Amino acid sequence: MNNPVIVVHYHELWLKGGNRRFFLGKLFTALRQALQGIPVERIEQPGDRFVVRLGAGAALDEAIRRVERVLGVAYFAVARPVERDMDALCRAAWEETEPLRFATFAVRAKRSDKTFPHSTMEIESAVGRHLLETLRAQGRDVRVQLKDPELTCHVEITPGPLLVYARKIPGTGGLPANTAGRITCLLSGGYDSAVAAYHMMKRGAHLSFVHFYGTGARPGESSLHVASGLVRALVPYQFRAKLYRVPFEAIQREIVRAAPEGVRILLYRRMMLRIADAFARRDRALALVTGDSLGQVASQTLRNLVAVDAVARMPVFRPLIGTDKMDILATAKKIGTYDISSEPFHDCCPVFLPRSPELSATADELAKAEANLDVEALVAQGIRGATIEKFSFSEGRVEATEPVPVMPADQHRTAIA
Ligand code: ATP
Ligand code: MG
């Protein structure tokens, strides 16, 4: 008879000020998009939460999995719809709490429909008393505790059926998707950059991705499929994403040929920043993001990071700069990128790596090391060779377009000008 209802709660923090309508509008759109393909009767907004009334035949498990990934959701719950009657409410609260294990509990009622003939206090005490009596009659050792109870049974008095729920499901938290502007991510196949991207998405940024790939020891062994896989895992959080795929081996060869061995990796990074900058501008992104973490590898000493950054023309964000690898890996597991990054892939030809990397470069030293390189031509070469793959998440599935060249040949000049 009554279809399941999902009650979605968000953090109030980001609702301060005049942006309330903007953020809630984006969260509403995100819920709608996330649930595409699942029958939804309507989404209501009684007070400080969303009530998603699923339609006939809706797959509840799938709906839960989708809402779990909606940014901006603090927690949510599957509620039982109940007819507007106190006895029915008590019975439903009992059915909801009886299978759960707890020693202390409280009942909390919210009333957005003031036509219901009982006050929240009356509802809380009547339902609380019923639960206490029936649970105790069953031999359960439980008591009411209003402050910090182990279990809270929620009652929502909204127009239409009443709602009861006791099992909260944690949401992703963060800010709603696509509320904070655009950022371009330098995405390797490793664990860090995908996690860095996720952190920025969680703050509402919309990300595009740039991946630099070698050709691989054998065909099909390059890192491209890993980068695509990572974007596929991330796109459900922001619904659309672009991946720029830049062939990098020839550029690396040129750096190996013309620059001192110890600073190679730092020069690769500088080339990556310059090329990513061009794609960021194309997308009107205002910053770049990388997965660097202080001191993680030789190229990420403080001095090296600063020396690399000297060529950046827009801010380079490093959300993982102070995060331990263990914590990064835990996040990668949570968001489903861990297994993808664990796949073996041919990242960078070993002959391109220095035997003893520089740990303490300066920007001047790197600029000198680039003196024998035609930097502009190499950037143009990177842009010219790039292809773009577009991803979208709809009806619960990720779709990708065939990769196509980024732009017609005559537009390269303007991109790097
Ligand atoms: P990750 O840091 O993602 O685990 P990694 O450890 O292999 O990968 P590092 O060598 O630590 O990568 O590189 C530091 C950062 O530089 C990466 O987090 C990423 O932002 C960027 N980067 C490195 N290699 C690539 C690449 N092939 N394509 C795009 N960005 C890259
Ligand atoms: Mg790393």
Image (spheres, rainbow, N blue to C red):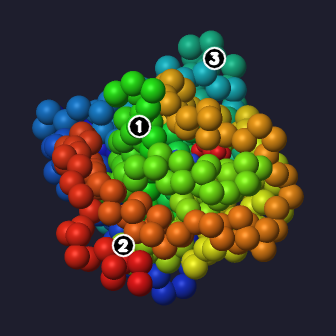
Name the disc covering residue 140, or none: 3
- Mark 3 and mark 1 lie on one chain; the one further toward the N terminus is 3
Q: Position of residue 204 (x, y in %)?
A: 48, 65
Q: State if disc 2 and disc 3 touch (CB < 8 Å).
A: no
Looking at the rendered structure, the kind of residue marked 1 is Thr
Which mark sits nearer the N-terminus, 3 or 2? 3
The residue lying at 61 percent from left, 74 percent from top is: 312
State the CA–CA distance, disc 3 to disc 1. Answer: 65 Å
Would residue 79 be found to the left or right of residue 267 on screen?
A: left
Whether the residue carrying mark 3 lies under 8 Å from ligand 1 is answered with no
Residue drawn at 33 percent across, 79 percent down = 413
Residue 28 image point, x, y percent: 32, 63
Three-letter amino acid code of the residue under disc 2: Asp
Image quadrant in which you'd find residue 11? bottom right
Q: Residue at x 64, y 26 (%)?
A: 102
Task: Give the residue type at disc 3.
Answer: Arg
Label 1 belongs to which residue? 215
Say above or below: 280 vs 264: below
Mark 1: few, some, or many residues within 10 Å (few <14, many ≥20)? some
How far apart are labels 2 and 1 at the CA level? Answer: 26 Å
Disc 3 element: loop
Image position, residue 63 (x, y; %):
30, 39
